[in-house]
Image (tube, rainbow, N blue to C red):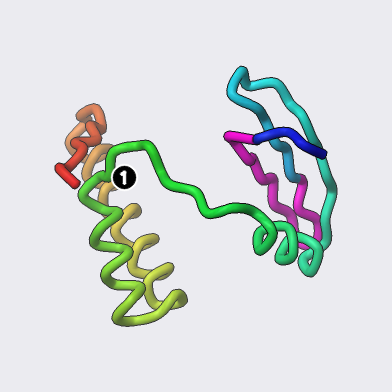
């Protein structure tokens, strides 16, 4: 297919990856159901992309931690940090605000 996708959405389950690819007008141009091996090949075949959203304070911290401690420990650390943020929001009964940081 010769489309130029701008957005790839992935739905995850235990064994199936539901992949939807949209163009610049948010029209679904392709949809696939892939197993784990096919999904790995799909990702490897995609061109490099860049995030266009501003970074939050948590993202640089997590990227730096992953480089030092590895994926598994970083996953636990991020889950712990998010749980603490959720608890603080609930305990203080305040709205959560994301503050982008300068890149």
Residue shown at the point (19%, 47%) measured from the top left: 103
Q: Nearer the viewer, residue 19 or 13?
A: 19
Q: Whole-percent x and y of residue 11? A: 69, 45
Q: Is residue 75 found left or right of 29 in the rendered image?
A: left
Vertical comparison of 94 with 34: above or below = above
Whether residue 12 is in magenta: the answer is yes
- The quadrant in which residue 61 appears is bottom left
- The quadrant in which residue 3 appears is top right
Label 1 crowd (10 A; few <14 / some 14-19 / many >=20): few
Vertical comparison of 29 with 89: above or below = above
Q: Whole-percent x and y of residue 25? A: 61, 18
Q: How many marks?
A: 1
Residue that sits furthest to the top in the current view: 25
Q: Which residues are magenta?
A: 5-18
Residue shown at the point (33%, 81%) measured from the top left: 69
Q: Nearer the viewer, residue 21 or 92?
A: 21
Q: Whole-percent x and y of residue 40? A: 71, 65
Q: Which residue is mark 1?
A: 86
Vertical comparison of 85 with 73: above or below = above
- The quadrant in which residue 62 appears is bottom left
Residue shown at the point (37%, 71%) measured from the top left: 74
């Amino acid at each position: 297919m010769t489309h130029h996708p701008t957005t790839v959405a992935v739905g995850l389950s235990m064994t199936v990856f539901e992949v939807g690819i949209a163009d610049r007008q948010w029209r679904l141009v392709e949809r696939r159901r892939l197993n784990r091996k096919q999904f790995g090949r799909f990702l490897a075949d995609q061109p490099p992309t860049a995030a266009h959203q501003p970074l939050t304070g948590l993202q640089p911290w997590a990227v730096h931690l992953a480089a030092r401690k590895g994926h598994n420990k970083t996953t636990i650390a991020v889950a712990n940090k998010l749980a603490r943020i959720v608890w603080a929001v609930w305990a203080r009964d305040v709205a959560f605000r994301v503050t982008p940081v300068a890149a």
